Image: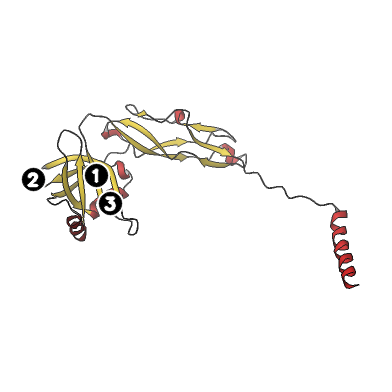
Amino acid sequence: MAERQEITVRAELRAGRGKNDARRLRARGMVPLTIYGGEGEAVSAAAPLRELAAILRSGAGHNAIFTLDVDGVGPTEVMFLDRQIDPVKSRLVHADLRRLVRGQEIEVSVRIELEGEPAGVRDGGGILEQLLREVEIRCRPSIIPEALHADVSGLGVHEVLHVSDLKVEEGITVLTEPETAVATVAVVREEQVEERTPEEEVSEPEVIGKGKKEDEE
């Protein structure tokens, strides 16, 4: 597992709660936040959009753990709990953050990345299909993986990789049903074109020609 990068984001307490206040914050390049959970009360704050967007674009994405240092409150480790994206501008407009408690396990979704070329693709002419993109896991925040990597190089035609086949590090519990299919190698069947006999190919113009002659008469 890659070493986690230490990230600290400075934030300010948010006094107002209305839409006008949120609009003013966004005009300044800030994002309204609410921090929940852990051992404290909910806190309303605001942090720079640029810094939060950079975290979401990182390899860990919404599972990234970072320190939020709120003026007048102090630093605390957090991760994204929920976020609201402007559908037109595709930009973060609000986020709920989860306050983390050291040693306490949490449940998160982690993406699955397939690795290798399946034998069924290489030798059997099949196509690799990924049927499941994420799995639910439970673990301590400090060991959340960026992704679960699955080797599919041994997968033959019509064979299926299940959740139970995924390899995880010690301390991680996979919550998704073990028999859920993750990937398979399928065979694409070509559409059969109806073949016509030479007699059928010859007879068709004769019928058309005959009908045309009768019409002329």
Does 175 appear above or below 60? above
Residue kind at label 1, given as amino acid type: Asp
Q: Are marks 2 and 1 in contact (CB under 8 Å)?
A: no
Residue kind at label 2, given as amino acid type: Gly
Q: Position of residue 130 (x, y in %)?
A: 49, 40
Does 70 appear above or below 29? above
Q: Is residue 128 left or right of residue 28?
A: right
Quarter occupied by residue 29? bottom left
Q: Which mark is residue 54?
A: 3
Q: Dot 1 lies on which element?
A: strand
Q: Residues within 10 Å of mark 3 (few under 14, many from 20)?
A: few
Question: Which colouring convention does the figure follow?
Answer: secondary structure
Cα distance between the residues tagged 2 and 1: 19 Å
Q: Which residue is mark 2?
A: 72
Q: Which residue is mark 1?
A: 96
Q: Is residue 63 left or right of residue 183?
A: left
Quarter occupied by residue 164? top left
Counting residues from the N terminus, which is met first, the one under dot 1 or under dot 3? 3
Q: Which mark is residue 4?
A: none
**What residue do we see at 25% from left, 41% from top?**
79
Quarter of the picture containing the N terminus is top left
Q: Are marks 2 and 3 in contact (CB under 8 Å)?
A: no
**What residue do we see at 84% from left, 52% from top?**
197
Cα distance between the residues tagged 2 and 3: 25 Å
Residue kind at label 3, given as amino acid type: Ala
Quarter occupied by residue 211? bottom right
